[in-house]
Amino acid sequence: MLECARSLKLTGRSLAVMAALACLYDAKNGGTPSIARHVLKPEKTYGFAQAHNAASDLRSVEMLARLTVAGLGPIALCTSDRGLAAFWCAL
């Protein structure tokens, strides 16, 4: 997975790479899925629409993180997507 990320010019610190790696470490016994799985929503058939949605979600989290670091005051995420909210809170 890291080789593929490097070929796409992604660093190991990118949210997309970290989220994809987190999905690899889900419990095999049917336990609670990783927070990242709720953002990426991986399936056996994964098309452009799913990839676009996941990339948009990750981009919004990245933007919020950058705004938070910029010191512009309190930053909040308003969404009905519980997985995205959990991912933001985990960061």
Image (cartoon, rainbow, N blue to C red):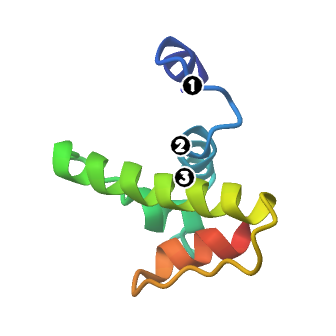
Answer with left or right where residue 36 lies relative to residue 39.
Answer: right
Residue 28 visible at all: no
Cβ–Cβ below 8 Å for labels 2 and 3? no
Residue 65 visible at all = yes
Horizontally, residue 49 falls left or right of residue 15, namely left
Sequence-wise, the earlier of marks 1 and 2 is 1
Mark 1 Cα within 10 Å, few/some/many (few <14, many 20+)? some
Q: Earlier in the sequence, mark 2 or mark 3?
A: 2
At 60% from the left edge and 46% from the top edge, which residue is drawn? Answer: 15
Secondary element type, mark 3: helix
Which residue corresponds to the image point at 65% horizontal and 26% vertical from the top-left? Answer: 11
Front one among 79 and 20: 79
Amino acid identity at mark 2? Ala
Which residue position is annotated with label 3?
23
- The residue under label 1 is 10
Where residue 57 sits, quadrant-wise, is bottom left
SS label for mark 2: helix
State the count of labels: 3
Q: Amino acid at mark 3?
A: Cys
Q: Secondary structure at mark 1?
A: loop
What amino acid type should be assigned to the residue bearing mark 1? Leu
Say whether marks 1 and 2 touch (CB < 8 Å). Answer: yes
Q: 77 or 39: nearer the eye?
A: 77
Q: Residue furthest top?
A: 7
Query: Measured from the top left, where is residue 60 in percent x and y?
Result: 49, 60
x and y percent of residue 65 in the render?
68, 60
Q: Residue furthest front?
A: 72
